[in-house]
């Protein structure tokens, strides 16, 4: 379960979805990549390890000022791995202000030869842009029609993300088979894929009509995805989601840790209420809930520092993940210098999982000591660590 939490925090992971655009605004310019950082990312972009390649290409795309990330947008689009393609789509979605990025997303949506999941992942940021204003007004109706047509072309469970995109944007008026209704039928049947990013996207969709079918599905799906559905329901305001997560916390063990992983990034204020209740939970649950709350902006810095310095390996890893979430939320937190110093101190000799968590936590920091510690790791013997450090420096 801790591995799932670590993967959810990793750059480019499909479990994490970008925040929906709310306005058509240009991105702030970024400084050119340091040559050593760029070299590490370019080497990673050619690596056979999908996770390494995914993170490297996504970081290079994000850093490239060329429209749609230049060559890296194309590299990511044509990569043989769906994971790399979806990470590319996520970065393109963050550049929705660029006509070239919108054009590449539309090309993917329209390409029937591309995996339906990748087409759907490309469709979702466009759909959010149509709904929330991230797409120019004179392009919205054409995109709405495009998404409706793409959703109409797919059959079976692999088309769920395309259906979701069309539901977010709003089906073209008069369409005989609304995407939201088709998606509701699929969800209620409970025969759903192990695509956790898709459930995250459902939770962030704001499509309230999906609460009822998700509630029905909750009792029908495999245990491996039940809490992902519960988290989606929580975000949409469905009380069954809250009940399922509370019940999982009461079970203790791995089931409780899985529930805590979903609550860590939940946007719903109800997540904080659930976590407060979990503080008095079974052994191990209360301490982990306190770390999750710290990552969400609440709790005592001293407890996290103590875990980083003296905790068992799993506790140190969870503390590093919580520290990273808090620093991303609140870079100027009182005592942040001590928190960053504690993360740096564990970098040289830490186990790989803790190293990756600490690297992620220090990413984007403007503190010279943090940048120096990450730069040192560009020479690490592990390509995974080298690329993670380069991604953190490139942020």
Image: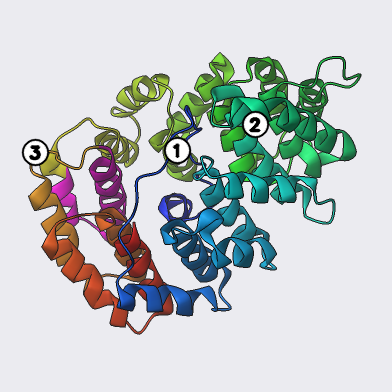
Secondary structure of the residue carrying tag 2 is helix
Q: Position of residue 237 (x, y in %)?
A: 53, 16
Secondary structure of the residue carrying tag 1 is helix
Q: Main secondary structure of the magenta part?
A: helix
The residue beneath circle 1 is 256
Question: 307 left or right of 21?
Answer: left
Q: Position of residue 308 (x, y in %)?
A: 18, 55
Report how far apart the C-alphas of labels 1 and 2 lie in the structure: 34 Å
Magenta span: 304-329
Query: As drawn, which residue projects farthest toward the right?
Result: 176
Secondary structure of the residue carrying tag 3 is loop
Question: 108 left or right of 225?
Answer: right
Question: 231 left or right of 147?
Answer: left
| Of labels 3 and 1, the one closer to you | 3
Say if mark 2 contacts mark 3, CB within 8 Å: no
- For marks 1 and 2, the one nearer the N-term is 2
Q: Is residue 296 above or below residue 50?
A: above
Q: Position of residue 316 (x, y in %)?
A: 25, 56
The residue beneath circle 2 is 127
The residue beneath circle 3 is 334
Q: Is residue 49 above or below residue 105?
A: below
| Residue depicted at 46% across the width and 55% down the height | 7
């Amino acid at each position: 379960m801790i591995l799932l939490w670590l993967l959810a925090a990793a750059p480019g992971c499909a479990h994490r979805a970008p925040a929906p655009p709310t306005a058509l605004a240009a991105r702030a310019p970024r400084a050119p990549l340091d040559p050593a950082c760029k070299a590490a990312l370019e080497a990673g972009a050619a690596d056979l390890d999908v996770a390494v390649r995914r993170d490297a290409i996504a970081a290079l795309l994000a850093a490239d000022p060329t429209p749609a990330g230049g060559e890296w947008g194309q590299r990511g689009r044509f990569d043989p791995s769906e994971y790399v393609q979806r990470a590319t789509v996520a970065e393109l979605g963050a550049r929705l202000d660029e006509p070239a990025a919108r054009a590449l997303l539309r090309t993917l949506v329209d390409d029937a030869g591309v995996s339906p999941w990748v087409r759907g992942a490309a469709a979702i940021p466009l759909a959010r842009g149509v709904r929330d204003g991230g797409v120019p007004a004179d392009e919205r109706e054409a995109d709405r029609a495009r998404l409706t047509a793409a959703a109409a072309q797919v059959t079976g469970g692999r088309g769920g993300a395309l259906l979701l995109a069309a539901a977010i944007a709003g089906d073209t008026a008069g369409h005989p088979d609304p995407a939201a209704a088709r998606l509701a039928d699929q969800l209620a049947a409970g025969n759903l894929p192990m695509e956790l990013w898709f459930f995250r996207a459902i939770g962030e969709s704001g499509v309230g009509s999906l609460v009822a079918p998700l509630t029905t599905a909750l009792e029908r799906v495999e245990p491996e995805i039940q809490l992902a559905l519960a988290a989606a329901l929580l975000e949409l305001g469905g009380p069954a989601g809250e009940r399922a997560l509370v019940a999982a916390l009461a079970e203790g063990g791995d089931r409780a840790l899985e529930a805590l992983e979903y609550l860590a990034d939940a946007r719903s204020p109800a997540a904080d209420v659930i976590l407060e209740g979990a503080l008095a939970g079974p052994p191990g649950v209360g301490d982990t809930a306190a770390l999750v709350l710290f990552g969400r902006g609440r709790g005592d810095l001293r407890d996290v520092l103590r875990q980083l310095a003296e905790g068992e390996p799993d506790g140190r890893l969870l503390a590093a993940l919580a520290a990273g979430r808090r620093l991303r939320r609140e870079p100027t937190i009182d005592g942040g210098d001590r928190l960053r110093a504690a993360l740096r101190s564990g970098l040289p000799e830490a186990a790989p999982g803790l190293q990756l968590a600490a690297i992620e936590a220090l990413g984007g920091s403007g503190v010279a000591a943090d940048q120096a510690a990450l730069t040192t790791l560009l020479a690490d013997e592990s390509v995974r660590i080298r690329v993670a450090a380069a991604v953190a420096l490139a942020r």
